[in-house]
Image (cartoon, grey):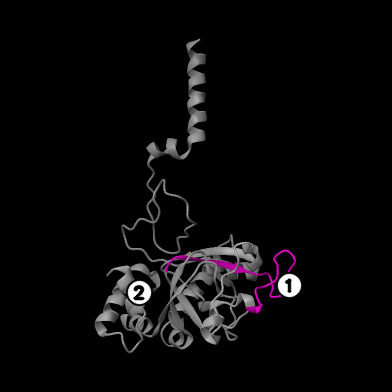
């Protein structure tokens, strides 16, 4: 199914989506979104049927730290950045939280009908707080607020470029997604508490890390990283085994300075021996 056709199906109301439409959407989301692979098909069906599609321009604040959240988002295409203030009060080194009417978030737009506004290019990203991570297509965000009693957003999320989202309402989340997300969050927090590098971190830093971590289950033969490709993050092995394969012939290209110094050292030794 082509991407434009997918978007056309997502724009349909729940009542307009046929069984054939839902099957095509389920197949597509299962391929691009790791979260859906862990869900029962009936749950995935309910989510894609009841959820809505929205396209967000770049530099739009999607969720604002401290606001009440009533939905979470799955990224269809594009990427978002996650920022977090130390506190919700004014902080000299971070700037004030985004709270005025000129900077309403997409959350507010959805729930209260505010006009969507982009923040100006001149506004530095540190205005939103400390940068936590980027989240790209196939991943979800905003669920932590739906799992808490007060439903307050714990971070500010901003569209990096144009981003297309599937919006999952709170009630759909509670009916279909809560058990799975609660288990995933428990797994991440349990890992953080047991891993000696993280277990003495402050609670806020552990929370930030839990937000940045993404769980994956891979089958035998799947490649996790390839030698020579750009670094895109750390991988922690929670369960199972991996095989490490190294191609020594790639090292001169990967470590050019070291290879050059080694070649020079060998040349100098040869010259000494020849004398």
Indicate which label's residue lies in the foreground, 2 or 1.
Answer: 2
- What secondary structure characterizes most of the magenta part? loop
Residue 50 vs 201, above or below: the answer is below
Residue under label 1, please give it. 90
Residue appearing at x 56%, y 67% in the figure? 82
If you read the primary sequence from the N terminus, does the residue marked by circle 2 or circle 1 appear first?
Answer: 2
Label 1 CA crowd tier, 10 Å (few <14, some 14–19, many 20+): few
Residue 175: percent from the left, percent from the top?
42, 88
Residue 182: percent from the left, percent from the top?
48, 79
Count of numbered circles in the view: 2
Question: SS for tag 2?
Answer: helix
Residue appearing at x 33%, y 63% in the figure? 219
Q: CA distance from mark 2 to mark 1?
A: 40 Å
Magenta-drawn stretch contains 80? yes
Residue under label 2, please give it. 7
Magenta extent: 77-101
Horizontal placement of 217 versus 271: left or right?
left
Q: Can residue 147 be seen at all in this image of the molecule?
A: no
Residue 26: percent from the left, percent from the top?
31, 76
The quarter in which the N terminus is drawn is bottom left
């Amino acid at each position: 199914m082509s991407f434009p056709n997918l978007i056309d199906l997502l724009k349909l109301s729940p009542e307009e989506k046929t069984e054939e439409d839902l099957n095509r959407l389920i197949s597509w989301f299962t391929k691009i979104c790791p979260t859906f692979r862990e869900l029962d098909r009936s749950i995935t069906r309910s989510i894609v049927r009841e959820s809505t599609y929205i396209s967000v321009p770049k530099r739009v604040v999607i969720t604002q730290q401290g606001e009440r959240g009533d939905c979470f988002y799955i990224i269809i295409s594009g990427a978002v950045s996650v920022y977090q203030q130390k506190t919700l009060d004014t902080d000299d080194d971070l700037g004030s939280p985004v709270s005025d009417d000129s900077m309403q978030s997409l959350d507010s737009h959805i729930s209260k009908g505010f006009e969507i506004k982009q923040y100006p290019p001149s506004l530095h990203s540190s205005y939103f707080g400390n940068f936590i991570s980027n989240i790209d297509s196939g991943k979800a965000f905003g669920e932590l607020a739906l799992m808490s009693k007060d439903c307050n957003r714990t971070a500010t999320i901003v569209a990096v470029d144009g981003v297309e989202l599937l919006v999952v309402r709170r009630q759909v989340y509670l009916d279909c997604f809560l058990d799975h997300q609660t288990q995933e969050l428990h797994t991440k927090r349990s890992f953080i508490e047991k891993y000696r590098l993280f277990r003495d971190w402050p609670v806020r830093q552990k929370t930030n890390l839990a937000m940045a971590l993404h769980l994956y289950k891979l089958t035998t033969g799947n490649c996790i990283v390839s030698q020579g490709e750009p670094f895109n993050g750390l991988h922690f092995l929670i369960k199972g085994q991996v095989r490490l394969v190294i191609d020594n012939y790639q090292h001169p290209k990967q470590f050019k300075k070291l290879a050059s110094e080694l070649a020079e050292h060998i040349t100098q030794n040869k010259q000494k021996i020849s004398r």
